[in-house]
Image: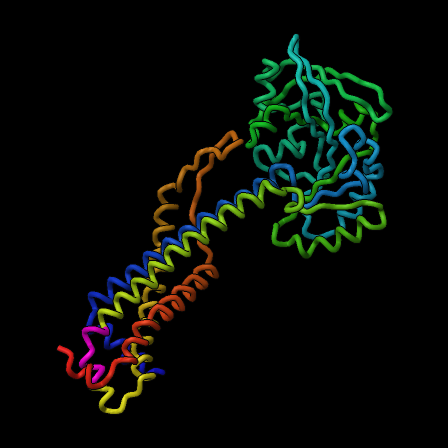
Amino acid sequence: MLFYIKLGYRNLLNNYRRSLKTILSIAIGLSACLLAQGFMSYTLLGLRESLINGGIGHIQIYQKGYLKASNDDNLRHLISDSKTVFRELSNVPGIKLFAPRINFQGMISSGDKSTIFMGTAGLPSREKKLNSLASLKQGTFLEDKKPFGIVIGSGLARKLHAGVGDTVTLMSTLKGGGVNAIDVEVIGIVEAQIKAYDDVLLLANLKTIQTFMDLPNSVSSIILLLNQTENLGKIEPSIQKICNPLGLEYRTWNQLAGVQYTQPKMFYDLIYLLIMIIIVLVVVLSIINTLNLTMQERVKEIGTIRSLGTTRLQVGKIFISESFLIGLLGGFFGIILGYALAGIFNALGGIPIPPPPGHAKGYTAFFKPGFIPALWLWMLFLMTATVGGFYPAFRAARLQIVEALRWI
């Protein structure tokens, strides 16, 4: 095989300009695929982490029946002995933070303005500093010295014409069926990524809401944040062992995110597949065109070596070795070009992306191509280039010796 590789290399040098153009086309195609993969993987990774740190967490623990209960009945399916659960969770390594949460809803009023809200009350069981809305959703913004403060979404604030320092009234139904009200102070306004959620968002202190709704030591769910998302599979069996004897159930982040993550992933996968198909077709046609021209220029040479005893199979191997080398070199330089372009774009500050439909804020995208996907792309383009050489190799092998020697 090494003999045919040497022959292929020499033939590439004999037509170095044409070979260089073909290698460059493969390099550009592979670098484009690598940039697309880097952009999509970074975007999906950012989406995953924003969902996890935005309130979903890596794992959520509930009382059995809570998820199937209606909004009016979910107060009957609360975790009543949360301290026992916390004690068990504290023995599980790899958990960065666990936060109890009560989900509640009702009416909020400010003067003559009233609207509905969807509230979350929480406070971490382990002190950790989180970022932006994630820390607000976990309750770290509410200290014991300000137990009657709430944070609301910017959309909800606009509806109420309320600002920081204003007093508003919350009204909600209780577990026993009555209605209670409480006056609280707006101590912060945040902007959620999803506009519809921003219009009803309310965050409160856990102890305040437990007292307000007469739910001492009860929580709707317990949210777990892990040290690394990749450790979820290792920690999940431990969570299951804790939940089963206590009559609890849990859901992981991908189960909770649902279409918020799966639909963008399916969209990106489809776009990436279409890009790959188009570029692979271009590479195949480019290889076929290059080797067809090479074959036509070397008809007499093929006739000569055939007359000296070279078999059809050996002639075909020579052309296939050329296409193999073109794919090998094109893939190598394509990876270098792809990483170089990714580095340049990242150094320039990334690409600003406008807000997706239904979201309030955009983001800056960077390119983070993976090493393993780059190797897979190299192998794909190498095989594509090799397969693209089959047709010219077949034509060269089928040439008749007498006709080839008469070629002018």
**Does 174 sit above or below residue 224?**
above
Residue at the image point whose x is 47% and y is 48% from the top: 40
Q: Quadrant of the N terminus?
A: bottom left
294 and 167: which is toward the camera: 294
Q: Is residue 336 visible?
A: no
Q: Quadrant of the C terminus?
A: bottom left
x and y percentages locating residue 235 in the rendered image: 70, 54
63 and 348: which is toward the camera: 63
Specify the principal SS of the magenta part.
helix
x and y percentages locating residue 134 in the rendered image: 61, 35
**Does 369 sit above or below residue 317?**
above
As drawn, the residue found furthest toward the top would be 112
As drawn, the residue found furthest toward the bottom would be 309
x and y percentages locating residue 110 in the rendered image: 66, 12
Q: How is the image coloured?
A: rainbow
Is residue 301 part of the magenta span, yes or no? Answer: yes
Range shown magenta: 295-303
Q: Is residue 320 visible?
A: yes
Total number of numbered labels? 0
As drawn, the residue found furthest toward the left would be 408
> 215 left or right of 148?
right
- Residue 200 falls in which quadrant of the image? top right
- Residue 145 falls in which quadrant of the image? top right
Is residue 81 part of the magenta span, yes or no? Answer: no
Residue at the image point whose x is 66% and y is 46% from the top: 255
x and y percentages locating residue 379 in the rendered image: 42, 66
